[in-house]
Image (cartoon, grey):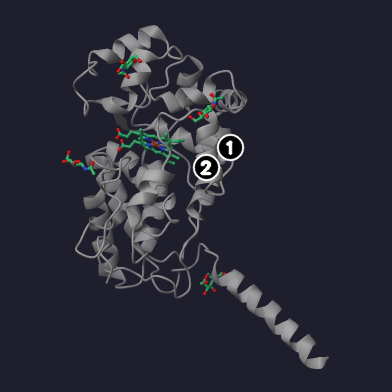
Amino acid sequence: MRTRVLSACIALILLCLSKVNGQLNSTYYDSTCPSLLSTVKAAVTAAVAKEKRMGASLVRLHFHDCFVNGCDGSVLLDDSSTITGEKTAGPNNNSLRGFDVVDTIKSKVEAVCSGVVSCADILAIAARDSVIALGGRTWTVQLGRRDSLTASLSGANSKIPAPTLNLSGLISAFTAQGLSAKDMIVLSGAHTIGQARCTTFRSHIYNETNILSSFATSLKANCPFSSGDDNLSPLDLQTPTTFDNKYYINLKSQKGLLHSDQELFNGGSADSQVTTYSNNQATFFSDFATSMVKMGNINPLTGSSGEVRTNCRKPN
Ligand code: HEM
Ligand SMILES: *[C@@H]1O[C@H](CO)[C@@H](O)[C@H](O)[C@H]1NC(C)=O
Ligand SMILES: *[C@@H]1O[C@H](CO)[C@@H](O)[C@H](O)[C@H]1NC(C)=O
Ligand SMILES: *[C@@H]1O[C@H](CO)[C@@H](O)[C@H](O)[C@H]1NC(C)=O
Ligand SMILES: *[C@@H]1O[C@H](CO)[C@@H](O)[C@H](O)[C@H]1NC(C)=O
């Protein structure tokens, strides 16, 4: 009897310990790398000052990292003889950018605390600092992720939502990650910054009706029917380099660039949340911060799982 009680107690303690180990916290590097946050912030601020779009590109890198086997830096791995990376996946090829900037941030971090900070955590901090650099609100970044030893090309092809999805498809892609419809709608607000290639919105402007026709017409000059695949247009036509709530205001006047954007205001269940954010930027900022932390918590490697990569492009 006594041993059974004892083993039950031990099991409970082990369960609690494993729970604590699996959790991120904001003070993870306080003693091992006290200058981490200021180092990353300075590097992100410099990169965004040089090219504002880079802020958008860094936010997207964190998203594409987290949606494939969790936030584990897998998106940063280059193809090699032993690894097939995620960079050539449909949603990423000729599209993801900022890898050089991540290398620069990582080398500055390595210079102040060598071998301590994961690439996955650097992406999470850089995404937050990018939002701030473009005028958004701050949040506390949770830390303690470790880097993967592998990547998943098939995961990148299947888990990252496509711009052709309808509202229920978008919601499913997020619930598959443990995120809610509300998270999906608010995180889509990241499309208040950055650019998209013609190939990602061509059918929306030529073949669809849930778009303001004058807006569709204005986009066609730079996105011909059968050429110019890589030509860029801003995801937020009003303020493409400012993190604000204009994305939602655009949706209300049928000026979403991607099919998937306009699905959020198309007479369906997402309409009311879009209206709320279009009327209240502070609510958008606050909900965005909450959902970014939630996204950053997707399936991290913690404890002794994975490793802290020296070079974000390859396992040690
Ligand atoms: C809801 C489903 C989503 C879909 C279907 C989607 C789709 C896309 C597409 C097609 C592009 C343009 C890519 C290209 O031109 O190659 C894009 C760009 C972008 N996405 Fe999303 N996205 C979604 C959610 C998100 C989320 C959750 C975030 C971040 C929290 C995000 C951040 C961005 C940013 C910042 C850009 C611009 C990147 C740049 O200019 O480099 N997206 N997205
Ligand atoms: C943060 O997490 C690490 C690793 O799990 C742990 O060692 C540390 O005690 C935690 N800090 C706090 C304040 O919970
Ligand atoms: C990725 O893009 C390159 C350059 O445009 C192209 O040659 C290659 O075929 C693409 N890879 C895949 C897997 O689509
Ligand atoms: C959304 O797309 C899925 C898959 O393409 C389709 O089965 C479903 O009927 C669509 N839903 C609506 C409401 O159009
Ligand atoms: C638009 O739809 C037509 C008819 O379905 C199709 O032939 C064409 O390729 C589509 N164009 C684009 C840009 O999606």
Hey, which quadrant is residue 96 in on the image?
top left
> Horizontal and vertical percent for residue 188?
47, 34
Looking at the image, can residue 315 be seen? yes
Work out whether residue 129 or residue 80 is closer to the camera in this orientation and state it.
80
> Which residue is drawn at the image coordinates 43% and 56% (left, top)?
71
Image quarter for ligand 1 equals top left
In the rendered image, the vertical position of residue 265 relative to residue 189, given as above or below: above
**Kind of residue indicated by mark 2:** Phe
* Residue at the spot of label 1: 181
Q: Earlier in the sequence, mark 1 or mark 2?
A: 2
Hey, which quadrant is residue 301 in on the image?
bottom left
Left or right relative to 24: residue 3:
right
Left or right relative to 147: residue 291:
right
> Horizontal and vertical percent for residue 158?
41, 44
Work out whether residue 260 or residue 34 is closer to the camera in this orientation and state it.
260
Work out whether residue 194 or residue 37 is closer to the camera in this orientation and state it.
194
**Kind of residue indicated by mark 1:** Ala
**Callouts 1 and 2 close, C-beta under 8 Å:** yes
Hey, which quadrant is residue 122 in on the image?
bottom left
Determine the CA span between mark 1 and mark 2.
Answer: 7 Å
**For the residue carrying disc 1, how many other residues have a C-alpha within 10 Å: few (<14), some (14-19), or many (20+)?**
some
Left or right relative to 25: residue 212:
left
Disc marking residue 174: 2
In the rendered image, the vertical position of residue 273 relative to residue 156, given as above or below: above
Q: Is mark 2 within 8 Å of ligand 1?
A: yes
* Direction top: furthest residue: 214
> Horizontal and vertical percent for residue 139?
50, 49
Q: Is mark 1 within 8 Å of ligand 1?
A: no
> Which residue is drawn at the image coordinates 51% and 62% (left, top)?
26
